Image: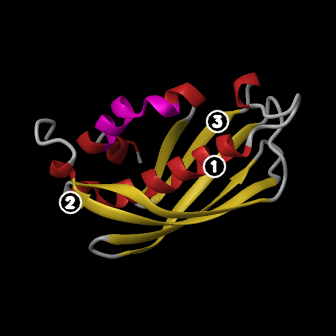
């Protein structure tokens, strides 16, 4: 859903998210509340000579969960922050693996959103699962000058 990715709040998120650039992450908006986030495991992600640090995978799934929620609330001129993140690692992410985090909003209230996701590699193997609680709040709380 390219039009939702073009929303000014999501475009500003892309500009501000330097951490995503550092880790080589990018995303596609499938629909409101549904995002696919991508990252290829490079040497910079490794904790051992061959496997990614769990923090790299956690960053990927947290970003996917957050942007899924952002697509849910951006039209209300809101942004989100992570309140709670629970992740289970099921298989290692190895050097050169192409990871995809698939995140979907489960329930959206006025301020609290519940979201779930999974990370798979290019072979379709499940690397991790996660769920999170996100807080939605007016974008004016972080930047009155942007919008």
Element on which disc 2 rests: helix
Q: Residues within 10 Å of mark 2 (few under 14, many from 20)?
A: few
Q: Earlier in the sequence, mark 3 or mark 2?
A: 3
7 relative to 26 in the view: left or right: left
Q: Left or right of 43: which side holds 140? A: left
According to the picture, the residue beneath numbered tag 3 turns out to be 39
Q: Is residue 35 visible?
A: yes
Coordinates of residue 62 in the picture (x, y in percent): 54, 52
In the rendered structure, which segment of residues is drawn in magenta? 10-20
Residue 24 in view of the camera: no
| Residue topped by disc 1 | 58
Kindly identify the residue that appears in the image at 59 percent across and 30 percent down. 23
- Residue closer to the observer: 122 or 107: 107
- The total of numbered circles placed on residues is 3
Residue 76: give its label.
2
Specify the quadrant of the image occupied by residue 31. Answer: bottom left
* Residue 19 belongs to the span the image colors magenta: yes
């Amino acid at each position: 859903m390219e039009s939702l990715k073009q929303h000014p709040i999501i475009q500003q998120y892309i500009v501000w998210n330097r951490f995503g650039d550092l880790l080589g992450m990018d995303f596609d908006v499938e629909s409101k509340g549904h995002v696919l986030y991508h990252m290829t495991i490079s040497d910079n992600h490794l904790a051992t000579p061959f496997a990614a640090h769990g923090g790299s995978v956690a960053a990927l799934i947290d970003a996917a969960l957050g942007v899924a929620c952002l697509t849910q609330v951006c039209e209300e001129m809101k942004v989100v922050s992570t309140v709670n993140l629970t992740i289970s690692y099921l298989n290692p992410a190895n050097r050169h693996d192409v990871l995809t985090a698939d995140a979907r909003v489960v329930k959206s209230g006025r301020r609290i959103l519940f979201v779930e996701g999974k990370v798979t590699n290019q072979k379709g193997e499940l690397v991790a699962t996660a769920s999170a609680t996100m807080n939605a709040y007016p974008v004016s709380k972080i930047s009155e000058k942007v919008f």
